[in-house]
Amino acid sequence: MWRLSPALSIGFLIAYIDRANAGFAALQMNHDLGLTSSQFGLGAGLFFVSYVLFEIPSTIIQARVGGPFWLSRIMISWGLASAAMMFVVGPWSFYGGRLLIGAAEAGYFPGAMLYLAAFFPPKHRSVVMALFAVAIPLSNVLSSPVSAALLGLDGLLGLHGWQWMFLIEGLPAILLGFSLVFLLPPNLGAVRWLTPEEKAWLRSELASEAAATRVPHANVWRVMFDPYVLLLSLAFTGSVGVSQALSLWQPQMIKEFGMTNMQVGLINTIPYALAAALMLIWSRHSDRSGERLWHTVLPLGLSAVALAAAVFVHELWLFVFLLCLTQIGAQAMKGPFLGLTSIWLAGPAAVVGFAQVNTLGNVAAFLTATSIGFIRDGTGSFQLALLPLMAIAAVACVGLQTVARRSAMQRLPLSAGAEGAL
């Protein structure tokens, strides 16, 4: 865990900083470039369009050329694209820059999941996956005050603060990308810290898992539209659609309460810091109990309820409290969910399956991120703009509850080792 997870987790943290820092740039950039909320929302959402288009092809290429090499290429590419955002001059160049970052980053998340699944047996994966996915809330904890501070460089050497922010925050991905091929072994056979006996045991565990997978190996299209893959995708839309949209829009929502940029940066860290801590605790509880499905359903339900309540709130402290509950739910489900995903998708089916789940999750993120901008321009209210997020979390929650009820009626276990068809 400590030899493989840190580099990938730091890379994912950087990825989320580079995809979401447009939310902080908007505090200055929208005024400097004359962007409306609708234009910003569309540009923010276009990231997910190119990300979705290149997600599955990127993951298939990784399966052929090797994880460390391909993940390194992805990281270097998105770092360059993110730094190039400093050159945008209007809505069309903003759209093009976001499309470029999405295409460059496509495949990193499912590729990292696929890589980690080749080293860890199922019963250990919830915590391992959570240590990777905890980079999502941590990225906002770290980047919120840093991005706010970088906006303060406005005017230095004739550049706007948001230009400095894009340039400086794009560099870490490039540097880590060049070192990734030296930090990660290409496969289990190349690992030097395990004995031959330990490698043989691990291969046996992984082979047993592949034989029991719910999604059999088939061609790309059959795996993409397998019922279990679509169900997992539905669940992931609830989390990704909520968390991604908020990462792009939350700073502007807080700003509307009359906060300075630095105050926005500090307040914005609170929901993500709580979510990061509870995400690890919830994932460890899932591993200890061996239960995955309800550990995914309950946090999604919490997010849906909190978002529904936020529509009627107009006080900063109460709005931030509901944002905390929303982020806790959206992030805490990820560890158990990724553990469940790695059980239902094992062996060759995992290559396409992981990518499909993440792809459809990011389709939801495009819809939610874009809809917030149009609703904000049309109604003048960020509270009403939260309704699509509530709806998508509720739909995902209901879908998983249906599976849970059906499993209970058939008396099927919902643990990490559950076998059989639902």
Image (tube, helix red, strand yellow):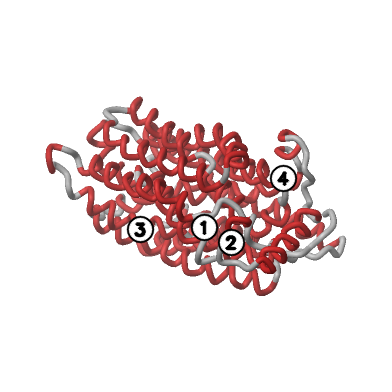
Circle 4 residue = 348
Q: Kindly identify the amino acid type of the residue bearing the numbered disc 1.
A: Ala
Alpha carbon distance from label 2 to label 4: 22 Å
What SS does tag 4 mark?
Answer: loop
Residue 335 numbered tag: 2
Circle 1 residue = 133
State whether residue 284 is above or below residue 95. Answer: below
Dot 2 or dot 1: first in sequence order is 1
Q: In this image, 34 relative to 79: left or right?
A: left
Circle 3 residue = 268
Dot 3 or dot 4: first in sequence order is 3
State whether residue 390 is above or below residue 219. Answer: below
Taking depth in this image into account, of 2 and 123 the one nearest to the observer is 2
Image quadrant in which the C terminus is located: bottom right
Dot 3 or dot 2: first in sequence order is 3
Dot 3 or dot 1: first in sequence order is 1
- Asked which quadrant contains residue 298, the reply is bottom right
Q: Residue at x 47, y 34 (%)?
A: 103
